[in-house]
Amino acid sequence: MEASYEIDSLNLITLSGWGYFGSSDSDGTSIYNASNVENILTRKYSNTEKSIYDYGSGSGSVSYQRTYKKPDQNLTFSYSIDASPMNTDATNSIDPVLNYITYAQKSKNDALGIEHTVQIDYYDPLTKKHLIETGVKYILRQNTSDTKIQRYDETTGNWVEDMSK
């Protein structure tokens, strides 16, 4: 989406934005077999995984443009923000068949990337051969990620935070 408002013939404000969000689910089982040099099965287990992945991206901006009575001379101020959230939730369960232990783990990660941009630009054609063109731009990027891992405790029947991460 985009919208502009012309305050008068020399001043313009513009707002814009877009975004998308989605989700993906995955379920699967894999079988692991290990054999010795004589091709005798020494270890076997199955791994069942279930995961949910949420993602997206959004962006918005606002700008102000001042045009002067002198042709092509202008001053622009702009601010934009971009955000990209990403969340994953996965559970793995190991079911032993031969010479392996039961194991179950959950992991959850909430992540977010945000970028702020502030910009000022000035353009002034002094003559047909000389001009002033200058600007300043500041970008601040912030990325956060919070991961929690839990293991299933067979003795208590509870999920316990894994402190070894």
Image: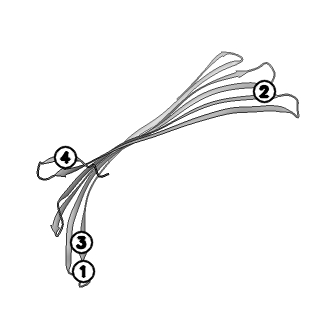
First reached walking from the N terminus: tag 2 or tag 4 = 2
- The three-letter code of the residue at mark 1 reads Asn
Query: Residue at coordinates 19% horizontally, 51% vertically from top-left?
Result: 152
Q: Nearer the viewer, residue 98 or 46?
A: 98
**Closer to the camera: disc 2 or disc 4?**
4
In whole angstroms, how far apart are the C-alphas of marks 3 and 1? 10 Å
Sequence-earlier tag: 4 or 3: 3
Q: In the displayed orientation, state which residue is furthest to the top.
A: 8
CA gap, disc 2 and disc 4: 66 Å
In the image, is residue 131 above or below residue 68?
A: below
Circle 2 residue? 72
Q: Amino acid at mark 2?
A: Asp
Crowding at dot 4, Cα within 10 Å, few <14 / some 14-19 / many 20+, comes out as some
| Residue 159 image label | 4
Q: Nearer the viewer, residue 150 or 131?
A: 150
Q: Is residue 153 left or right of residue 37?
A: left
Q: Is residue 96 visible?
A: yes
Between discs 2 and 3, the one toward the N terminus: 3
Q: Which residue is mark 1?
A: 36
Q: Amino acid at mark 3?
A: Asn
The first of marks 2 and 1 along the sequence is 1
Q: Amino acid at mark 4?
A: Trp
| Residue contact between numbered discs 2 and 1, judged by CB atoms under 8 Å | no
Task: Give SS at disc 3.
Answer: strand
In this figure, which residue is indicated by the disc labeled 3? 33
Marks counted in the figure total: 4
Q: CA gap, disc 4 to disc 3?
A: 28 Å
- In the image, residue 144 sits, relative to residue 26, either above or below, namely above
